[in-house]
Image: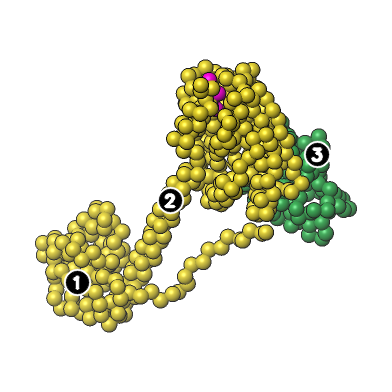
Chain colours: A green, B yellow
C-alpha cells in the first residue's frame, strides 16, 4: 500500500492506494504517529478512492486510529465496490463519517 | 490495552557446560589418542571414547553416540575420508560435527577433507589450545542447534495439541445427529484453518422445542492469537444460552464481554441464526458477517451487516425473521470463500455464490450438498490462504 499525507491547518487528508492489509500494520502505525505528532488533527479524511482491497486487519488499524484520535472527526472517503461493501457490512458508519 | 513489541533475546557469550558432551577419537596412533584425550580431560570434557581405525570408529559412533568425532585421515584399512563420507551419507549422523586432524596440510588436501564432509580441520602436530578452541566451537554449535531443534519439536507438538483442542471446540458429529433426529435440521460443516490454528469458530446450541441456534464467528487475523480468542469466546458462549426469540441480545451480551477482553484493533464478526423447525421460521442477528445465502425456497442473501463484536459498547444489533419451511437451506461461510480469487483473478461474487448454492441444494441432504459446493468452488482455484469455515443447513421433514 502507498500512502501520502496532506496537511492543511488542523485538517489532514490521508491518501491510501493499493491493497490495505495486515502487511501494512507497521507502516500504518507510523502514519498514525505522524498524524498525531503535534496534536491530534481536528479533522481527518482518509481517502480510500484508490484502495482496491481492505482486509479485517486493515479495519482493525482504522479502529486503532479512531481510538487514538477519539475527539477528531474522521471521514472515510470513496473506495472500490468491495471496500464500500466491507464498510457497509461492518457498519463503520457508526464510528466514522462516510463520504463518496 | 497496548500490544507488546516483538523482541528476540538470544543468550550472549554464555559459557556452555561441556562436561556432558561425548567425544570420539579415531586415530591409529595410541600416543596421539592419549595426547588428545589428555587435552580434552583438561578442558573439562571427560566423556571420551577411542577407536584405532575407520571401521572400529563407525561401530563406536553407533554405540557411543558422540557429539563430536576427532578423526585422523591416514589410517590403515578404511581411511578418514571414507569415514567422513559414510557419516554424511547416514541421515542419523549427517549433522554430527567431524574435526579432522591431519599431517596433510596442503591447500588441496584441506579442500578434499572438507569435500568429504569434515566440519573443521586442524594440522598436526597438535597444538593443545587450538584443538580445544575448535572442539569447543563445534560442541557449542552442536548444543545450540540441539536446543533449537528441541524447542521447535516442542512448539510443533504444542501447536498440534492446540489444533486438536480447537477442533474439539466444534460441534460433535453425534450431537448433530441427535439434533437432526429431533428437529429434522441437518447440518454439515467444513473447517480448515490456514495455519495450524485459526480464528474461525462455528457453534450449535440445541434450544429445545425444535429450536436450534447456529453461529459462525471469525476473529481478526489468524494463527495463535486469533485461535486463543476463539477459546475465550467459546468459553463465554458456553456460559450463556441465547433467547430463541432474541439472537440480537445474545450478540450484544457477547459484544459487551469482548469489548473488555480484546485489545484495540481486534474484533470478531458473527452471524447467529435460530431456526425454529416446528414453526418453519428463522430469527437471526449479525455483527459484520459475510452475507449468508438462504433458499426458503427463493434463493437470496441475508443481511450480515452490523458492527463487529469487541469494538464498541455502543453497538446495537437487530433481529430479523424470515420463513424457513421444510426444504429450506441456509449456507454460512467465512470471508475466505469470497476473498480468494480463481485462476483468472476473479473473486466469487454474490450472484455466482447464490447460483452455486442453488445448484448444490438439489443434492440429497446437507453433507452431499456441501461436498458438491466445495468441489465446485475449488475447481479452477489455487489454495485458500485464510481460515475457511463453511456450514450448510437443510431443513428436512419434522420427525413425527
Secondary structure under the numbered disc 1 in the rendered image:
strand
State how far apart marks 2 and 1 are (Cα): 40 Å
Q: Nearer the viewer, residue B274 or B165?
A: B274
Looking at this rendering, what residue extends furthest in the bottom direction? B42
- Examine the rendered structure and indicate whether residue B328 appears above or below residue B262: above
User: Which SS class for mark 2?
Assistant: helix
Which range of residues does the magenta coloring cover?
B393-397
- Does B378 lie within the magenta span? no
Disc 2 sits on a residue from what chain? B
Residue B17 lies, with reference to residue A3, above or below; the image says below
User: Neighbour class for label 1 at 10 Å: few (<14), some, many (≥20)?
Assistant: some
Q: Nearer the viewer, mark 3 or mark 1?
A: 3
Estimate the x, y position of residue B234 in percent, counting from the top left.
Answer: 56, 46
Camera-nearest residue between B387 and B11 = B387
Q: Residue at x 30, y 79 (%)?
A: B44
Q: What percent of the width, then of the height, locates residue B222? A: 56, 46
| The label number, if any, that marks residue B49 in the structure image | 1
| Residue B125: quadrant of the picture | bottom left
Q: Is A21 placed left or right of A73 in the picture?
A: left
Name the side, left or right, on which B389 lies relative to B322: left
Task: Please tell me whether mark 2 or mark 3 is closer to you in this view.
Answer: 2
**How many numbered markers are drawn?**
3
Q: Earlier in the sequence, mark 2 or mark 1?
A: 1
* Chain letter belonging to callout 3: A
- Residue B82: which disc? none
What is the chain letter for disc 1? B
Residue identified by numbered label 2:
B161
Q: Residue at x 58, y 60 (%)?
A: B6
Q: 10 Å neighbourhood of mark 2: few (<14), some, or many (≥20)?
A: few
Residue underneath mark 3: A98
Amino acid at each position: 500500500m502507498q500512502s501520502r499525507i496532506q496537511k492543511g491547518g488542523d485538517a489532514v487528508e490521508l491518501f491510501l492506494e493499493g491493497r490495505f492489509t495486515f502487511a501494512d500494520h507497521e507502516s500504518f502505525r507510523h502514519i498514525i504517529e505522524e498524524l498525531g505528532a503535534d496534536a491530534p488533527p481536528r479533522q481527518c479524511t482518509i481517502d480510500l478512492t484508490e484502495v482496491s482491497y481492505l482486509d479485517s486487519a486493515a479495519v482493525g488499524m482504522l479502529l486503532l486510529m479512531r481510538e487514538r484520535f477519539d475527539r477528531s472527526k474522521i471521514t472515510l472517503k470513496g473506495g472500490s465496490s468491495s471496500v464500500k461493501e466491507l464498510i457497509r457490512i461492518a457498519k463503520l458508519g457508526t464510528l466514522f463519517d462516510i463520504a463518496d | 490495552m497496548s500490544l507488546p513489541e516483538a523482541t528476540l533475546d538470544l543468550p550472549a557469550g554464555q559459557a556452555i557446560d561441556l562436561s556432558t558432551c561425548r567425544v570420539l577419537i579415531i586415530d591409529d596412533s595410541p600416543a596421539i589418542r592419549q595426547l588428545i584425550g589428555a587435552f580434552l580431560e583438561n578442558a573439562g570434557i571427560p566423556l571420551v571414547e577411542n577407536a584405532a581405525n575407520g571401521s572400529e570408529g563407525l561401530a563406536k559412533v553407533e554405540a557411543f553416540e558422540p557429539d563430536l568425532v576427532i578423526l585422523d585421515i591416514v589410517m590403515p584399512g578404511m581411511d578418514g575420508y571414507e569415514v567422513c563420507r559414510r557419516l554424511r551419507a547416514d541421515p542419523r549422523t549427517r549433522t554430527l560435527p567431524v574435526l579432522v586432524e591431519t599431517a596433510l596440510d596442503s591447500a588441496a588436501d584441506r579442500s578434499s577433507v572438507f569435500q568429504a564432509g569434515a566440519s573443521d580441520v586442524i594440522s598436526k602436530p597438535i597444538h593443545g589450545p587450538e584443538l580445544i578452541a575448535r572442539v569447543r566451537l563445534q560442541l557449542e554449535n552442536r548444543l545450540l542447534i540441539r536446543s533449537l531443534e528441541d524447542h521447535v519439536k516442542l512448539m510443533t507438538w504444542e501447536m498440534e495439541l492446540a489444533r486438536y483442542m480447537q477442533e474439539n471446540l466444534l460441534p460433535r458429529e453425534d450431537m448433530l445427529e441427535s439434533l437432526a433426529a429431533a428437529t429434522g435440521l441437518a447440518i454439515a460443516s467444513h473447517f480448515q484453518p490456514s495455519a495450524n490454528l485459526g480464528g474461525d469458530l462455528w457453534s450449535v446450541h440445541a434450544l429445545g422445542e425444535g429450536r436450534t441456534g447456529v453461529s459462525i464467528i471469525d476473529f481478526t487475523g489468524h494463527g495463535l492469537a486469533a485461535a486463543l480468542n476463539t477459546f475465550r469466546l467459546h468459553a463465554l458462549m458456553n456460559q450463556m444460552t441465547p433467547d430463541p426469540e432474541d439472537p440480537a441480545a445474545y450478540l450484544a451480551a457477547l459484544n459487551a464481554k469482548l469489548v473488555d477482553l480484546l485489545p484495540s484493533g481486534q474484533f470478531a464478526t458473527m452471524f447467529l441464526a435460530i431456526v425454529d423447525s416446528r414453526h418453519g421460521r428463522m430469527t437471526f442477528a449479525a455483527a459484520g458477517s459475510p452475507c449468508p445465502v438462504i433458499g426458503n425456497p427463493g434463493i437470496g442473501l441475508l443481511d450480515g451487516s452490523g458492527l463487529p463484536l469487541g469494538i464498541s459498547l455502543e453497538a446495537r444489533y437487530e433481529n430479523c425473521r424470515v420463513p424457513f419451511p421444510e426444504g429450506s437451506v441456509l449456507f454460512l461461510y467465512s470471508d475466505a470463500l469470497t476473498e480468494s480469487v480463481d485462476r483468472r483473478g476473479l473473486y466469487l461474487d454474490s450472484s455466482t455464490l447464490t447460483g452455486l448454492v442453488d445448484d448444490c441444494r438439489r443434492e440429497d441432504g446437507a453433507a452431499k450438498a456441501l461436498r458438491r459446493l466445495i468441489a465446485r468452488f475449488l475447481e479452477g482455484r489455487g489454495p485458500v490462504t485464510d481460515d475457511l469455515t463453511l456450514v450448510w443447513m437443510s431443513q428436512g421433514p419434522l420427525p413425527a
